[in-house]
Amino acid sequence: QVQLVESGGGLVQAGGSLRLSCAASGRSFSSDAMGWFRQAPGKEREFVAAITWRGSRTYTADYADPVKGRFFISRDYARDIVYLQMHSLKPAGPALYYCAAGWVPCTRDPQYVYWGQGTQVPVSS
């Protein structure tokens, strides 16, 4: 059974930092994309960041414009864990951050086959 399990969420103050983790099990995603999306109450799920293996120990990271320069995605290919390091968090309601994995034609689209349950990240002002 394939599972993606997020961890690291929690209340953080505006301007603070937080690191989310997503551990995959049940199959390897070493040659697939892994990404992060978030969804605030009453809003659509939106792309945050994704990382894709390009071979020869290289990868490509992609970020949504609102988080560029503040969020950083990384990956432990040996353990199939993807991280999202978030800095300078802005005040926001309790958004759910979801991990996603699988082959997709566009890493920014929420067409991934596998999803985690989400971890909540409320940012207080």
Image (cartoon, rainbow, N blue to C red):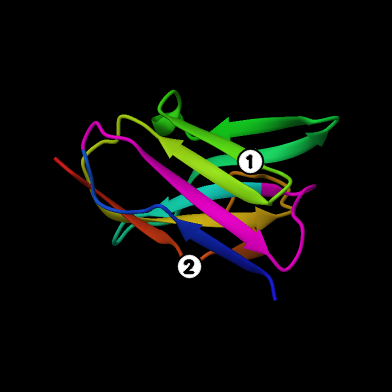
Please tell me which residue is depicted at 64% across the width and 64% down the height of the picture: 114
In front of the other: 12 or 62: 12
Let me know if residue 27 is in the magenta part. Answer: yes
Quick check: 109 above or below 1?
above
Q: Amino acid under label 1?
A: Arg
**Label placed on residue 3:** none
Residue 32 at what x, y percent from top left? Answer: 75, 49
In front of the other: 101 or 76: 76
User: Which quarter of the rendering shows the N terminus?
Assistant: bottom right
Mark yes or no: residue 65 visible. Answer: yes
**Label placed on residue 75:** 1
Q: Is residue 2 left or right of residue 71?
A: right
Mark yes or no: residue 46 visible. Answer: no
Please tell me which residue is depicted at 68% across the width and 70% down the height of the picture: 2
In front of the other: 113 or 85: 85
User: Which quarter of the rendering shows the C terminus?
Assistant: top left
Q: Amino acid under label 2?
A: Gln
Let me know if residue 42 is in the magenta part. Answer: no
The residue stretch that appears in magenta: 14-33
Q: Is residue 35 left or right of residue 95?
A: right
Circle 1 SS class:
strand
Q: Which residue is mark 2?
A: 117
Q: Residue furthest left?
A: 125
Residue 27 at what x, y percent from top left? Answer: 76, 64
